[in-house]
Amino acid sequence: MSKQIEGEILANKQLNESDYRLVLSLPELVDEIKSGQFLHVKCGPGLDPLLRRPISVHQYNQDRGEIVLLYRVFGKGTKQLAKREAGKKLDVMGPLGNGFDLTELENKILVVGGGIGFAPLMALVEKLVELNKEVMVLLGARRKEQLLCTDKLEKLSVGLKVATNDGSAGQKGYVTRLVEQELDKDKYEQVFACGPTPMLKAMQSLVNTKDIEIQVSLEERMGCGTGACLSCVCKVKVENDEGFEYRKACTDGPVFEASEVILDE
C-alpha cells in the first residue's frame, strides 16, 4: 500500500549537466519497493509547481533503509528538486506502479536502457545478479557524458555494451543497433527495457521476430500518479471494435508486456 511520507535527503548529487542522484532515508517504505516502481515527489517547498513529479526508484537498500532516485532536470519541478539539500526533508508518495514481473524469470536476460530510461533498470539488474541470472546490459545515450551507471555496472557480474549517437563512447548510433546485433549473435530468453518511445517501438519489432518475452517500462507524463487524472493513459491491445482500450500508466503500469501495448510516437 502506498504512503505519503517525508524522508530525509542524504545526498543530492549532480552527475552530469542534467542528471542527478538523490539518496533518501525511507526505512518506512523500503521494504515494500519492487524494481520498476516509482515515487511521486513534491519537488518544491511550496505549492508551485502544484503537481508532484513521478520519479523511478533507481536503487534501494533494505539494510540501510535507503531509496535512490535518478532524475533528469527537464522543467520547473525537477529544477526545484535539484536545489534540495542534504539534511532537509522531502515529501513523497509511494511506492506506486506495478514494477517488473519477476515471477517467471528466465536465465539469459537482456536489459536495455536508453538515456535516463536506465533509471528504473539498475535495481532490476542488481536483483537479477542476486538471483544468479546471466545478464547483458545495453546502454544508449546521445554522448559519453550522458551514459549512466557504467562504473557501477562494470563492478557487477554482467556484460555491458554502450552506444552513443555521436560515437564518443562505444558503438556510434542508436542502442537498438546493439540490440539487433546481440539478438542475432546470441539467444536471449527474456528482455527488459526502458527508454524513449521510438526506442521501445523499434525493440518491439526486433524482439517480436525472435519470439522473446519483453517487458517495457513507459516514460509517460503523469499528473496525480494514482489513476485519477487520466493524463498518462496509453493504448493496450484488446479484442473489441477498435482493437484497443486505454489503461493508466501510473496504476496499470508503468511496466507492460511489449506485446500488449501500442506505442504511439
Image (cartoon, rainbow, N blue to C red):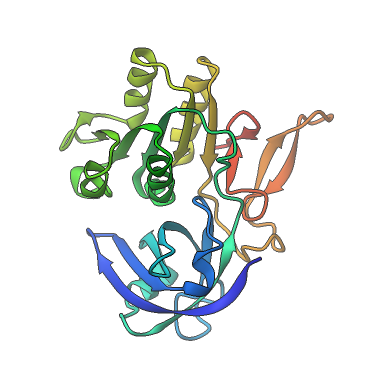
Q: Describe residue 152's horizontal placement relative to residue 247 as left or right.
A: left
The percent coordinates of residue 190 (x first, y second) are 49, 28
- Residue 257 vs residue 26, the one in the foreground: 26
**Residue 211: quarter of image:** top right
Asked if residue 53 shows in the view, the reply is no
Q: Quadrant of the N terminus?
A: bottom right
* Residue at the left extreme of this rendering: 168
Residue found at x 63% / y 66%: 224
Eyeballing the image, is 2 above or below 125? below
Asked if residue 49 shows in the view, the reply is yes
The percent coordinates of residue 226 (x first, y second) are 66, 63
Residue found at x 55% / y 78%: 5
**Residue 153: quarter of image:** top left
- Residue 241 vs residue 62, the one in the foreground: 62
The percent coordinates of residue 184 (x first, y second) are 37, 13
The percent coordinates of residue 201 (x first, y second) are 50, 31
Residue found at x 34% / y 45%: 115
Q: Describe residue 64's horizontal placement relative to residue 11 as left or right.
A: right
How many labels, in total?
0
**Residue 65: quarter of image:** bottom left
